[in-house]
Image (spheres, rainbow, N blue to C red):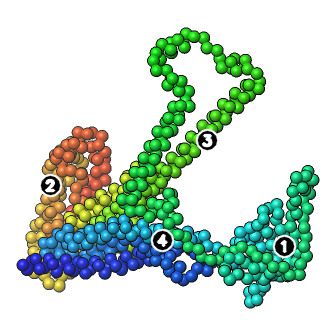
Amino acid sequence: MKNKFRLKRLYSFILQSFLPMFLMTFVICLFLVLMQFLWKYIEDMVGKGLDIKVLGEMFVYAALNLIPLALPLSILLASIMVFGNLGEQFELLAIKSAGVPLLKTMKPLIILIVFISVGAFFFQNYAMPKIQVKFYSLLISIRQKSPELDIPEGVFYKGIDNYNIFVERKNRKTGMLYDVMIYDVSKGFNSMAVIVCDSASMKLSEDKLSLAFTMFKGQQFQNFQSENIGSSNTSKEFVPYSREDFKRKQMLIPFDANFNRMEDSALEDNAGSSYVSKNSAQLKVSIDSMIIKMDSMNRVDRVQMKKYSHLSFRNSYSDNIDSIGQLAQTAEIAPIDSILSLETLDQQSSIMRNAMTKVENNNNEFLFRSMTKVATQRTINRHWVEWHRKFTLSFACFIFFFIGAPLGSIIRKGGLGMPIVMSVILFIIYYILDNVGYKMTRDGVWIHWVGMWFSSFVLFPLGIFLTYKAMNDSVMLNADAYLGFFKKVLFIRENRHFQMKEVIISPPAYNEISNKIDNLNNEIDTYLTNYRMMGYKKYWFDEGQDLQFAVVKDHIEEMLNSLANSTHQEVLDKSEEYPILINNQRPFKAGSTGAKIFAYVFPVGLIMRLISLPFERRLYKDLVRVKELNNELQLITERL
């Protein structure tokens, strides 16, 4: 009962550590992706005089629409931070020491992630279609709204359809415009009007559907077109115009400044964008109906091609096709050019025109059908994309937890430093892979299930690998392990460190140390005599080399461990000068199965033997150095 209660408290502790962190990271990630959305669509919303209520509604729908992007990232970041904190504070070590494996520690969070994944599926399947319809209809409405009227100085303003307005300068206090020029092409370019005036004022009508433009002291020039003049030959050389002088003139310009919200049904009824408003069952029904439509179009195209192909004459013969073919080979057929030359020129021209017309009609018909099939296939692909997205979000949450939790237990770093770096790198990889799969599916390059699950196929093995490494206490992300490896490869030596101990229980016996030094020197001389320069066969098959080297190395370490308890700084300093010997010179022990395989595969074995020569030379120098230090140390111990 006691152990059972302890595990329940452990689960409660893990949940209490994860839930606040998950909520915090979810809010942060949602805020970041929302800022990315704002940066992307800022030009569509600025300068249009939108109401705060409309902007607030837009941000709410955008935040809900971006939840599938923020949820996996927040799970990844929270799991790395939680298990990184547990590892950094040695709480994870204490849990493992109590006999609780990592998977059992993750058990309450696995159950929680399962519930989150199921909730994400229902959110994607039932809530997301309604959210996307509201979001895209509002976004399109904002894009279609006319910007606020703010005519700049010194440049032509084209913000009003069919009107180009130039203002030299303006008074911002009174709103008066000076030295104004207006190009009016609302009645067509042939009836263009040009208005020049000293000053003008503008005012928006109460219904915000037109702009009242009042002009003072100016002239209006307009092309004068009449049916009689326009049909005469002189109209091509000279176009008359009318001129009007005015002291005060008022003109109404159509300008809709209202915000007209797009109806949701416009997206739902549109075949090209209706996929955003459907759940998985509706998407599957639409896909099946479009596939049936594609099959019917393909059948019609096959019939048409068969009808108009040059082999269509074979359809009119039911029997004796072979005999007819043999007869056709023996018969003398006149060339088509000679048959055509027998007709008159008018008949030849008529035949050629009819043939060309028929070819062009067939070409246009097949081209139109191909465009229709391409558009239908693209719509099918978009429906498949939305159908798979109902499931990929849930699976991504599950994968990111099994990446983040083991990764946090391996790196053992909490806070916001290393976890953010690792989570951002992994999420960028996931985002790139997901976009590649999405575009390949949308363009029909990959099969839909391959493209939409491409990122999951890549990251799922990574989650399994990290979980396995974390369960076995891997040091794959330990910088010291990689540093030691590169030191060995680059022949960078490690130094020994011996500090004076305040309390010494068993001080070294210097008389015994002196005897050990003599024996050690003899062992080194024997080793160097036998294995100073090894041949190819001895290198791979002589088992005595590994055994004798292990004896020498163990005796050196045993002597130095005894000297580490010395109370004399002179002895400790001399002990620090001893080099650290390498562990081995070959990838396998001599005489083992792996060594025999390398030896018999001569090119590989020879290459490995050549690679081992620098290590062998270094070992020889180290052993010679050990003998010199032994002699110096023996003098010190004899004096003591």
Q: In the rendered image, is residue 236 in sight?
A: no
Residue 169 location (% of width, % of height): 79, 81
The residue where tag 1 is placed is 195
- Which label sits on residue 134? 4
Viewer-closest of 172 and 465? 172
Mark 1 Cα within 10 Å, few/some/many (few <14, many 20+)?
A: some
Q: Is residue 189 left or right of residue 133?
A: right
Q: The C terminus appears in which quarter of the rendering?
A: bottom left
Say which label, 3 or 4, has the lower sequence index: 4
The answer to which of marks 2 and 3 sits earlier in the sequence is: 3
Mark 4 belongs to which amino acid? Answer: Lys
Q: Check disc 2 and report the residue beneath it.
A: 548
Tell me the quarter of the picture where residue 150 sits: bottom right
Q: Which residue is mark 3?
A: 364
Labelled pair 1, 3 in contact (Cβ < 8 Å):
no
What amino acid is labelled 1 in the image? Ile
Disc 2 on helix, strand or loop? helix
Amino acid bearing label 2? Gln
